[in-house]
């Protein structure tokens, strides 16, 4: 199948991108790496009038440190996230999640901005960014704003990125020194997550100082497992504690039903994966 | 025994047969020098886009094509009403007198019967324009009630898929050992068993999931009507069969149609069909008198290319408490989908001959009800009815072992045919020519380290390990090498089962082998050259295969049912022997000897008892020169042979799977897989191993991942490769293969078939393994595919019911 | 040829270096890279198997790394270098060590997934010159093969890794280098 016919623009700066979106009206869409969008276009499940390509905009492929934050350009690819030393140091969970996305070819093209803006509830980066208390820089006709991950994800495939907005960067507070693990469960290796759980822990003196846990595909948006986090804060690092806390990951969630899982199964699986992620993040066998 | 994994390429035994020859096919395929149908572009070619039904069952109220017709680049738009010349698609197997055959028109008229049924076709100058215009075709449907579940379809008052047929029952077909004269009365035997404290009766209902063959190349068709012979290129396994069937059903005569299967990207039975799309492209090309192309999308493929399996098996097995089987009763419900493809109605019947497996069963009955539903038709897929049968009997053998507390190997051994008992006339009316199940099984057990794994299994059970270990067993025989024509005739099958070959001896010493067996990845060019090299003494490198084109290979029955070597190969051998017979008097003449004194050995004609000889190559040149041949002799070495097999081919084997089941997540991990095959004499071990490994991955796919899913309204829920899970390299294990050899006695090469063994044996081996792991937890069964959610849910359910019992 | 019926946005000119040859074409913006290769450049060695980025049959190298050419717009490849299965062997037909390894290890049957599988392998072995069996399998998870059961492919990739490591300065590496110079 081929996409419907559309107009195409490749502005050279963000202002041009926003202007193109404004001019393009309701049916303008942004393309970044295209790895979420192309299958949708090819199945003709979307029929944009205009595609606005970010590829000529400078600066969107950079990763830099700003104070205690890592600022990741929207067009940084999953491959880069998975292999970049700065990401590994300051946002280990993000690197681990990125390494599980799709397959190598998709990771070479797919971008963090595109993945977050697409907001598939089974997406991996959303859960990682949410766990890491990340935020997204969004530019629109009214200027630039930064939206925290918790407010960014609004519903199935719906984010704070408005019709004429473009996500330009993702900010992650440094989690240098934190242990982390992204546990993703799929039916076959290249499938989307049935459920995934990302956990990252700051441990000192054998005590969990802070715990951050988020889940993919457990609801319309990525979810924080706050009850797990609360149970772990200040707790000693031992298998029993981690397991008891992790088991609660699915509590209170309303995950989807499909051939890969019932809501009941997903709630259970979230607990299993959380236990495994926590043990691994804590370095406990 | 020969072990395969460590194949040293190009080892040089004297004969070509047995050598791990690297494939002649590879260089082209590896460099992109390929001829896939979709590669073809012809002057003036137009492209088709099809408008398909979004409903499982609906009346077509009206179709407005005006907007589409007026769109840019559009050459024409047709509905079923606009194509009065179209003929109903053919079926090739009238399985029973009560068979109901619904009319499948290339373009639907009046109603649609499944999602994907074609209602209109658009021809345009580009594919993009055709797709755009297809969206402008406005179809008004009146949705009708659909029936998706075959059991529901059998209920009184169910919606009828074809109201004109008055029933959803497509056909019924049965056989039993009393009528066949091969054994006792099943009902009496089961009833006796029920009243006998020394016997057990096991009843199970098993399910064969609906799956798709999953060829990676989508189907594509090009028709060029600009020559005297209209040429069709199609991504088909069966150009010869397609030509005849199109000539019989569409407005074109056989001699006016040439069909070419160029490079074909996998088939597995999925391209063993005469499709509505092929007929449509032909019809539009004839209308427009210009070349026409249609290439399906994957999504179209999922909703129109035939599916497979989809059976409900109600099985009753009676046995003595020592494990000896006394009766086996098979009652099948087979889901046809909405229409009949060329073999649809007969696929489950093939299983009727195989439900007895490798076992001596004194009383047997098979009854099948073919049922219509509002889904895509089912038809052949690698094994075609026999994997389903093997699944049934091999699952039951494990159920019997569990019931009796016996080792699953032991219960099988107690029942299988012993080496000294061949040829063996089975209760299903076949004669197995040869086999040695003890040898294959003993080899497999040793490779597998069966006892060690049983010990590990016991430890894991004892320690309540969250990861349980299961050992899956399947010992099997396959019905392959389709097929003896007389047997087909007795089953009301619409053609013979022979194969044809020609050998053309070229003056420079090179050889063209023309085969009616049409390759699509099996390595025919390589294996056939090995056969011919041995027969004619011509170097392997000097032999080329011509196939897949009805103009150059005018007679053929094509490739399916593991027939290429055991039927097609024998035709080639027959032709080669005729070449030698024709060459011998010429050689004798050149040697100035009497033909009786000349013998042919390793490429040379020798005068017995002398060192006087002439090579085949020299005879080839002299025949072409024709200067000095015996008086009155036709100057021609080229030969044809049509081989009709006397019997089927019965490859066998023992497969053992070690599966780990994570009881926390339900994940099944295949840790080890050992298979010992007996495929008779091996022509090319590299190709044989590839066939086995590929089939195993498909079988594991069926067992663990793959399922075509429809919702209750008949909407296809697994219409893309994102929701139909084909296994990747990560999802299948490293296989350990080995081979035992008992030569086939039904052909002079001693070869047996190999292509369908993996899809036959792997599903029961895997499922038996998972249940072996989970039975102690109280899990009685899990239906395929054994996805994590299903396995986990089964464990939960078992725990729940056990708590009820204890609590 | 493509686009005669669609003039909405006009055509966009793209320039791509395909297998060492710089080529230019006018495309509709909706044209996929794989369609550009197959239909406008006649490079039909690269094939299409699905529309959801699952099968990987269309894999090519875009600026040196493996991508699925069905999931890239032709306009996005403007100015880029594309290497396909048709440019991998030496001009005299000598197979690239990866192609040779697929041949020797029966890493293909019908051959339809092969262009993508081989091109993905080129990229995989650049990422990891000495992969374990598990790493090979994981590295190929975006490429589906229905014929081989993957065992021959995995063996081929490991054999290719060994062959490439013993002849690190193979002609192919030189050619890849030469091809990338064309665009720079």
Image (tube, grey):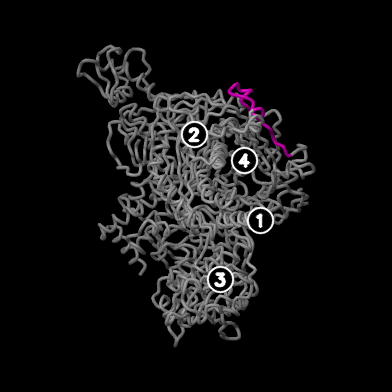
Is there CB contact under 8 Å for labels 4 and 3? no
Q: Secondary structure at mark 2?
A: strand
Percent across and percent down for residue B723 are 58, 56
Q: CA distance from mark 4 to mark 3?
A: 50 Å
**Residue shown at 65%/73% (left/top)?**
A26
The boundaries of the magenta stretch are B168-188
Q: Nearer the viewer, mark 2 or mark 1?
A: 1
Q: Quadrant of the N terminus of chain B?
A: top left
> Looking at the picture, does residue A199 appear above or below residue B140?
below
Q: What residue did someone put label 2 on? A: B477
Q: CA distance from mark 2 to mark 4?
A: 37 Å
Please tell me which of labels 1 and 4 falls first in the chain. 4
Q: What residue did someone put label 4 on? A: B279
Point out which mark residue B804 bears.
1
Residue B185 counted in the magenta span: yes
Query: Same subunit under labels 2 and 1?
Result: yes
Q: The residue marked by circle 4 belongs to what chain?
A: B
Q: Secondary structure at mark 4?
A: helix
Q: The residue marked by circle 3 belongs to what chain?
A: A
Q: CA distance from mark 1 to mark 4?
A: 59 Å
Q: Nearer the viewer, residue B633 or C113?
A: C113
Is there CB contact under 8 Å for labels 1 and 4? no
């Amino acid at each position: 199948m081929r996409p419907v016919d559309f107009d195409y623009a490749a502005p050279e700066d963000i202002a041009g991108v926003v202007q193109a979106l404004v001019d393009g009206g309701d049916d303008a869409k942004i393309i970044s790496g295209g790895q979420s969008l192309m299958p949708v276009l090819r199945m003709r499940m979307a029929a944009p009038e205009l595609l606005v390509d970010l590829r000529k905009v400078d600066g969107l492929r950079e990763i830099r440190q700003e104070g205690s934050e890592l600022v990741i350009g929207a067009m940084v690819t999953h491959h880069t996230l998975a292999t970049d030393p700065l990401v590994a140091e300051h946002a280990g969970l993000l690197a681990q999640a990125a390494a599980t996305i799709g397959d190598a070819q998709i990771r070479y093209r797919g971008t963090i901005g595109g993945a977050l803006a697409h907001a598939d509830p089974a997406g991996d980066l959303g859960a990682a960014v949410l766990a890491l208390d990340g935020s997204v820089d969004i530019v629109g006709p009214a200027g630039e704003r930064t939206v925290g991950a918790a407010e960014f994800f609004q519903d199935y495939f719906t984010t704070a990125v408005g019709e004429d907005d473009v996500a330009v960067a993702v900010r992650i507070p440094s989690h240098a020194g934190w242990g982390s693990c992204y546990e993703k469960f799929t039916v076959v290796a290249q499938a989307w997550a049935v459920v995934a759980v990302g956990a990252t822990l700051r441990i000192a003196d054998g005590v969990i100082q802070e715990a951050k846990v988020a889940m993919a595909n457990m609801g319309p948006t990525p979810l924080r497992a706050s009850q797990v986090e609360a149970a772990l804060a200040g707790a000693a690092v031992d298998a029993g504690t981690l397991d008891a806390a992790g088991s609660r990951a699915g509590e209170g969630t309303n995950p989807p039903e499909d051939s890969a899982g019932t809501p009941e199964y997903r709630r259970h699986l979230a607990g299993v994966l959380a236990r495994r992620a926590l043990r691994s993040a804590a370095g406990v066998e | 025994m020969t072990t395969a994994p460590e194949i040293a390429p190009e080892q040089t035994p004297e004969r070509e047969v047995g050598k791990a020859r690297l494939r002649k096919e590879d260089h082209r395929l590896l460099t992109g020098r390929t001829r896939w149908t979709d590669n073809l572009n012809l002057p003036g070619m137009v492209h088709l886009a099809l408008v398909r039904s979004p409903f499982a069952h609906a009346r077509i109220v009206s179709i407005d094509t005006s907007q589409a017709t007026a769109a840019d680049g559009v050459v024409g738009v047709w509905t079923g009403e606009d194509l009065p010349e179209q003929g109903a698609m053919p079926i090739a197997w009238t399985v029973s007198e009560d068979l109901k055959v619904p009319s499948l028109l290339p373009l639907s008229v009046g109603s649609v019967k499944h999602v994907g049924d074609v209602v209109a076709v658009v021809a345009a100058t580009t594919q993009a324009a055709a797709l755009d215009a297809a969206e402008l075709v406005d179809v008004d449907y009146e949705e009708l009630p659909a029936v998706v579940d075959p059991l529901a379809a059998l209920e009184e008052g169910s919606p009828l898929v074809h109201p004109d047929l008055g029933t959803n029952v497509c056909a019924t077909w049965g056989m039993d050992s009393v009528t066949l004269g091969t054994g006792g009365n099943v009902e009496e035997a089961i009833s006796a068993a029920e009243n006998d404290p020394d016997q057990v009766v096991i009843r199970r209902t098993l399910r064969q999931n609906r799956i798709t063959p999953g060829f990676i190349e989508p189907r594509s068709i090009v028709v060029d009507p600009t020559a005297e012979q209209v040429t069709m290129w199609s991504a088909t396994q069966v150009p010869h069969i397609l030509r005849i069937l199109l000539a019989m059903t569409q407005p074109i005569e056989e001699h006016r149609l040439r069909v070419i299967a160029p490079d074909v990207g996998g088939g597995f039975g999925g391209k063993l069909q005469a499709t509505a799309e092929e007929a449509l492209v032909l019809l539009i090309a004839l209308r427009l008198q210009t070349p026409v192309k249609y290439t399906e999308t994957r999504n179209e493929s999922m909703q129109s290319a035939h599916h497979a399996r989809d059976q409900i098996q109600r099985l009753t097995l009676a046995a003595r408490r020592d494990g000896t089987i006394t009766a086996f009763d098979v009652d099948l419900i087979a889901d046809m989908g909405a229409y009949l493809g060329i073999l649809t109605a007969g696929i489950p019947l093939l299983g009727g001959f195989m439900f007895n497996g490798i076992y001596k069963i004194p009383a047997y009955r098979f009854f099948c009800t073919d049922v219509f539903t509002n889904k895509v038709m089912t038809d052949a897929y690698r094994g075609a009815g026999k994997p389903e049968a093997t699944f049934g009997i091999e699952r039951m053998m494990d159920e019997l072992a569990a019931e009796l507390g016996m080792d699953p190997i032991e219960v099988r051994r107690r029942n299988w045919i012993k080496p000294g008992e061949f040829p063996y006339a089975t209760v299903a009316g076949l004669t197995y020519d040869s086999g040695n199940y003890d040898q294959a099984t003993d080899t497999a057990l040793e490779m597998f380290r069966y006892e060690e794994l049983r010990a590990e299994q016991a430890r894991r059970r004892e320690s309540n390990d969250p990861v349980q270990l299961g050992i899956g067993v399947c010992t099997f025989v396959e019905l392959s090498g389709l097929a003896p024509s007389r047997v087909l005739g007795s089953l009301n099958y619409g053609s013979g089962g022979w194969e044809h070959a020609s050998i053309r001896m070229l003056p420079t010493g090179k050889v063209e082998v023309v085969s009616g067996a049409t390759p699509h990845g099996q390595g025919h060019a390589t294996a056939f050259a090995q056969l011919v090299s041995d027969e004619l003494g011509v170097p392997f490198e000097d032999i080329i295969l011509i196939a897949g084109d009805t103009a150059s290979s005018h007679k053929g029955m094509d490739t399916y049912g593991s027939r290429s070597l055991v039927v097609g190969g024998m035709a080639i051998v027959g032709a080669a022997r005729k070449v030698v017979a024709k060459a011998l008097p010429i050689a004798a003449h050149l040697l100035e000897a009497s033909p009786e004194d000349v013998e042919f050995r390793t490429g040379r004609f020798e005068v017995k008892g002398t060192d006087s000889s002439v090579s085949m190559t020299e005879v080839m040149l002299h025949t072409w020169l024709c200067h000095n041949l015996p008086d009155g002799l036709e100057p021609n070495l080229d030969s044809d042979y049509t081989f009709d097999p006397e019997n089927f081919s019965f490859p066998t084997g023992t497969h053992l799977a070690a599966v780990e089941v994570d009881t926390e997540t339900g994940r099944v991990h295949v840790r080890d897989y050992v298979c010992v095959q007996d495929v008779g004499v091996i022509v090319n071990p590299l190709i044989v191993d590839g066939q086995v490994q590929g089939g195993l991955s498909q079988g594991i796919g069926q067992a663990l991942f793959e399922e075509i899913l429809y919702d209750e309204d008949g909407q296809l829920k697994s219409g893309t490769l994102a929701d139909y899970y084909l296994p990747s390299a990560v999802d299948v294990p490293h296989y350990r293969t080995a081979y035992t050899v008992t030569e086939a006695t039904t052909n002079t090469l001693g070869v047996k078939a190999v292509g369908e063994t993996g899809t036959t044996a792997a599903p029961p081996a895997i499922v038996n393994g998972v249940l072996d792991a989970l039975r102690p937890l109280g899990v009685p069964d899990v239906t395929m595919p054994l996805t994590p959610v299903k396995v986990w849910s089964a464990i939960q359910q078992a725990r729940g019911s056990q708590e009820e019992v204890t609590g | 040829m493509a686009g005669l019926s669609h003039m909405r946005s006009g055509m966009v000119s793209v320039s791509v270096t395909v297998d060492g040859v710089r080529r230019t074409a006018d495309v509709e913006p909706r044209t996929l890279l794989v369609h550009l290769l197959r239909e406008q450049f006649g490079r039909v060695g690269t094939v299409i198997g699905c529309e959801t980025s699952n099968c990987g049959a269309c894999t090519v190298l875009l600026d040196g790394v493996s991508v699925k050419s069905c999931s890239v717009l032709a306009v996005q490849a403007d100015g880029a270098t594309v290497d396909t299965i048709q440019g991998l062997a030496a001009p005299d037909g000598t197979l690239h060590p990866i192609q040779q390894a697929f041949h020797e290890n029966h890493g293909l049957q019908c051959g339809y997934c092969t262009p993508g599988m081989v091109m993905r392998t080129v990229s995989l072995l650049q990422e990891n010159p000495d992969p374990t069996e598990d790493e090979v399998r994981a590295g190929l998870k975006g490429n589906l093969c229905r014929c081989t059961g993957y065992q021959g492919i995995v063996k081929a990739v490991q054999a290719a890794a060994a062959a490439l490591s013993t002849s690190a300065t193979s002609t192919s590496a030189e050619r890849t280098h030469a091809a990338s110079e064309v665009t720079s």
